[in-house]
Amino acid sequence: MNPYKLLWSRLGGRPWTYIIRDLWHRFEWLWIIGLLLTGYWLGHRGYDHMLVLLVAFNLGYVAGHVFWGTEYVPGQQGE
């Protein structure tokens, strides 16, 4: 069995991508404010440029999995 499927079936009952996608659509304003504040905080703290690029890449990678590939269906269940 797929280790990820084994994990999400026990923790959340459906793929975490679907859970995050539902949270985004329910609390979009909070997500946007949180992402902006995180970017401001990282920029203001003066962290190494490479760390900021790494965080930006990872956020983009996660966003790609959340928003592209399948159509959004509220409350979508796993296979």
Image (tube, helix red, strand yellow):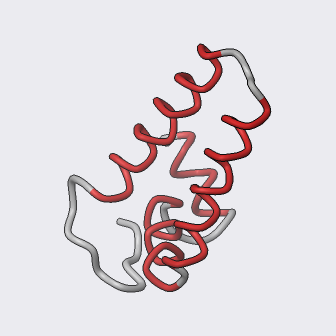
- State the residue at coordinates (58%, 51%): 6
Image coordinates of residue 72 in percent, x first then y, are: 27, 74
- State the residue at coordinates (46%, 77%): 22
Image coordinates of residue 3 in percent, x first then y, are: 56, 40
Could you tell whether 71 is left or right of 2 in the image? left
- State the residue at coordinates (58%, 56%): 36
Image coordinates of residue 37 in percent, x first then y, are: 67, 56
Could you tell whether 52 is left or right of 61 in the image? right
Q: Residue furthest front?
A: 44
Q: Is residue 16 above or below residue 13?
A: above
Q: Quadrant of residue 70?
A: bottom left
- State the residue at coordinates (37%, 78%): 76
Closest to the observer: 56 or 4?
56
Q: Residue furthest right?
A: 45
Could you tell whether 52 is left or right of 1 in the image? right
Closest to the observer: 6 or 55?
55
Image coordinates of residue 51 in percent, x first then y, are: 65, 20
